[in-house]
Amino acid sequence: MTQQTKMIEEDLAIRLPNHDILSTPVTLEAVVFYASESEKIKKKIDHLAAEVSQKQDRIKFVNEIIQEINNSIDPSTGKVDLRNKAEFLEKLNTAKGMGINIPMDSKTEHPKAHFNAEERERFLQNLGLSADAWDKENKQHTQKMQMYLDESNRYLTLATQAMKYEDKPKRAALAAMGR
């Protein structure tokens, strides 16, 4: 008996304390198979959940940049000048590393931090497009996670039904003995 089979049997014994050890090898193999498939699916769900969380953090980061730009608009000209804000420039470098299209200053080869009204709007649009793309990916991942969860639940239902099938003859025998 493999280590995985033993672990699954122990898990089943904990979850179903009044359930006898499965006696039919075929039933045991079915339960082990269904439980192991469910565990594989759970790992896929966990992986997708981590990706969703990471993208949510990226979206939040981009929204912080957008907010900072919007809060720094000169109302009379519509220009934005964030050259003196080192923290903002660092955020732009980080955003560039995330794959966001950041306009570069041709003289310094650093991210541009001074925008006229038109440049600002284009830059905000690029930031928004990046956040939207990540949001769409998150929605797809969430749908995939739901499909995996449904599949996992089907495997667990099959395992439960296999155990019920195993119990029927025992219950019938006990009922007959009680008469």
Image: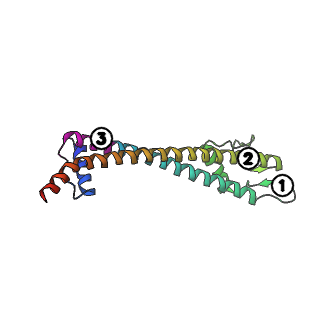
Horizontal and vertical percent for residue 46? Answer: 43, 48
The amino acid type, in three-letter code, at marker 1 is Gly
Is 32 positioned to the left or the right of 77 in the image? left
Helix, strand or loop at mark 1: loop
In the rendered image, the residue lying farthest to the right is: 76
Which residue occupies the extreme front position in the image?
179
Question: Is 176 situated left or right of 116 in this image?
Answer: left
- How crowded pointer 3 is (Cα within 10 Å; few <14, some 14-19, many 20+) is rated as some
**Picture residue at 71% right of the left edge, 44% below the top:** 126
Disc 2/disc 3 C-alpha distance (Å):
50 Å
Report the quarter where the C terminus lies. bottom left
> CA gap, disc 1 to disc 2?
15 Å
Magenta stretch containing residue 35, yes or no? yes
Q: Main secondary structure of the magenta part?
A: helix
Q: Which residue type carries mark 2?
A: Gln
Q: Residue at x 22, y 55 (%)?
A: 19
Magenta region: which residues?
Answer: 22-36
Q: Residues within 10 Å of mark 1 (few under 14, many from 20)?
A: some
Residues at circles 1 and 3 in contact by the CB criterion of under 8 Å? no
What residue does disc 2 label?
A: 125
- Which residue is identified by label 3? 33
Residue at which label 1 appears: 78
4 left or right, relative to 148: left
